[in-house]
Image: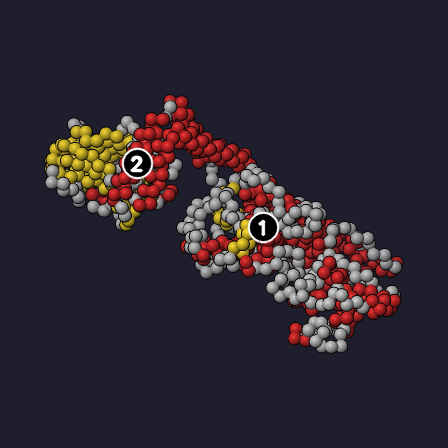
Amino acid sequence: MNVARQTAPLVLALSCATLLAAPVSFDRDVRPILTANCFQCHGPDASTRKAKLRLDLEKDTRSVLQEIVERITHDDADERMPPAKSGKKLSSAQVETLRQWIAQGAKWETHWSLKPLRRPANPKLPSPQADWARNSIDLFVRAKQSEIGVAPSAEADNRTLIRRMTFDLTGLPPTPAEIAAFEKAATTNRDQAIAALADRLLASPRYGERWGRHWLDVVKYADTCGYDKDKLRPNAWPYRDYVIRSFNENKSYARFVQEQIAGDALFPGTTDGILGLGFIAAGPWDFIGHVEVPESKIDGRVARHIDRDEMVSNTLNTFTSATIQCARCHDHKFDPYTQKHYYSLQSVFAAVDRANRPYNASPELNKKKSDLTARITELNKKLTALDAEMKKAGGKALAALDKKIATLTPKAKLQAKRPEYGYHSIIVKNPRIPKWVQVDLGAPTDLRRIVLRACHDEYAGIGGGFGFPVRFKVEGSLSADFKQPIPLADQTQTDFPNPNIAPVGFDVKAKVRFIRVTATVLAERKNDYIFALAELQALNTDGKNIALGTKVTSLDSIQAPVRWARANLTDGHFPIAADANAIAKLQTAQRERTALIAKVQTPERKAKRAQLHKSRAEAEAALKNIPAGQMVYAAATQFKTQGNFKPTGGKPREIKVLHRGNILEPRGAVRPGTLPIFAKENFEFKLPAAHPESARRAALAKWITRTDNPLTWRSIANRIWLWHFG
């Protein structure tokens, strides 16, 4: 458009002609015309915009007001707007509407949904119409009826009315006795009977069930996950019951919203604060994309991106009726929402996943659990600080050993692993309960070397050295009762460093038939302790392993073929490293590190470490003794790992704007934020640098429930009207 072109005479003439015309509303009359006919080329989408002109912005539109009328009425088809090739054409009525709007001053209006909330004045109606109304809502209804020239329908008879109200509020028909009672009461005082009926139905437990169905449909609640495998969600129902109970208890809507987004943060120690989080987990979830595909792969990242999109869209659609998901790929075409706003909302949910999490009926237990968890976290921080202090005391020598160990560890990793893991003792809670396993060589034999091979098991992320004893001894004997043991190796006085899968060998010179390995301090597994060995080798004077295939006995054992069995201790199968030389060097470096740590370990540090470990063990034991409670499928940051589906531990993933929604085209990182509907406020949340992830959700929950948030309260008002009267 040529902004310089002026059509003042035309506008002046129009102004005079429209002084008596009805006021034109931009929001009601003009915006729909511009949206349908102009925004394709002059709207918010930069990729299709022509002439650098945006008719969705007041400033741009005002700069071309004069030209708008001229272009939409131009005689030359090449100059007329919209262009013929667009397939759009303004009707004469639409042209006249735009003319009148400009002539009346082109008053710009914010979209009605974003206007500040206010209580409108009741319409003033003439007496017959005003007398018909029983309340303010009736006045608005009757005013609109009068405007469009229709009369109210006749009032329903008593039988019809009780059926309508009962079905509407409970979803069930009234009983014959209820109908008869209402009809009788209505003959005396109909208004009072209607009010009493409404109160009775609203107090009925069936009311919460009826409204619960409406709400659960909105939030996409289901008892299965959807997608290909459509896995069951056996713990989804507590959220369903929470919704029903909340409606029946007449819980405030603000609290109802806040519990479902950040109940754990805003109402800590409460059962509903956890149950409400079932809202975030209510939608579909891709089992394959989360469990079977790691987050490091593209498909895994896409699955998690779509999952966060579901959380964002469900939250904004449900509570504000805003279709923010359009901005996942592009700036919103008709609302003031950009991709940055959308991805700032994704950042709010960047640390949570859908998973089972415990909840307790007792707030006291919840608080105790929270306090113990905080206590353990604090003790771990102190242990980490003590480790840092030790590293500092170790100086350059310790730093060099740590660097060497870090370099050798990948080279010493497992080369191949058979299904036969080895021997595994019974699990115990005390690391100082002795465990032993022994082999029978069949006859007294001259030995020159004993070699112990450690297990490899990914349980609790341990890997190499799984179950290898912290302290142990190796003995020989000529009799199975070991009444006269022959010492072969003694590691009972100091902790033995985890060997990973390096062989642990001892030169010996003894004639024995039986060999026994006794663990005096067991290896930690996860909140418990075990003794495990992959292989025991006994080399004779010829260097031959004569323990191969021999009989194995033990104090106790787990027999879980094929993985764990006593016989596996002498079957010749054990984990080996890709680089045998690296594993030997690694073992040496680990021993040197242990010796150096012992050298710089002062009595004070040793006592402090022992006390911290003791306190942590006590707190962990107390935490474990708290009843787990029932589980609810909800938003969670801590849960049991399932395949590639692992908890974040509360650490948010970094969220970046994705160009056109493509996971392979990330742009700038974003901070947690929301929609820019309050002009004088930054859409990004003001959060401290070191904030818990729940603070993000709490900020969003508080923003949604602001008393001046026009979207939230209009949304629920419309839902109430639709579900009661729609």
Horizontal side of residue 212 vs 195, given as left or right: left
The reply to whether residue 296 is visible in this rendering is yes
Q: Which of 647 and 408 is in front in this view?
A: 408
What residue is disc 1 on?
344
Residue reaching furthest to the front: 4
Horizontal side of residue 252 vs 95, given as left or right: left
Q: In which quadrant is the N terminus drawn?
A: bottom right
Horizontal side of residue 722 vs 138, given as left or right: left
Q: Residues within 10 Å of mark 2 (few under 14, many from 20)?
A: some
Residue 496 to residue 680: above or below: above
Mark 1 and mark 2: Cα distance apart in space: 47 Å
The reply to whether residue 357 is visible in this rendering is no
Question: Residue 126 at what x, y percent from top left?
Answer: 88, 59
Q: What residue type is labelled 1?
A: Ser
Q: How crowded is mark 1: few (under 14 residues within 10 Å), some or many (20 or more)?
A: many
Label 2 SS:
helix
Horizontal side of residue 522 vs 178, given as left or right: left
What residue is disc 2 on?
589
Q: Which of 527 and 41 is in front in this view?
A: 41
Q: In which quadrant is the C terminus drawn?
A: bottom right
Q: What residue type is labelled 2?
A: Ala
Image quadrant of residue 289?
bottom left
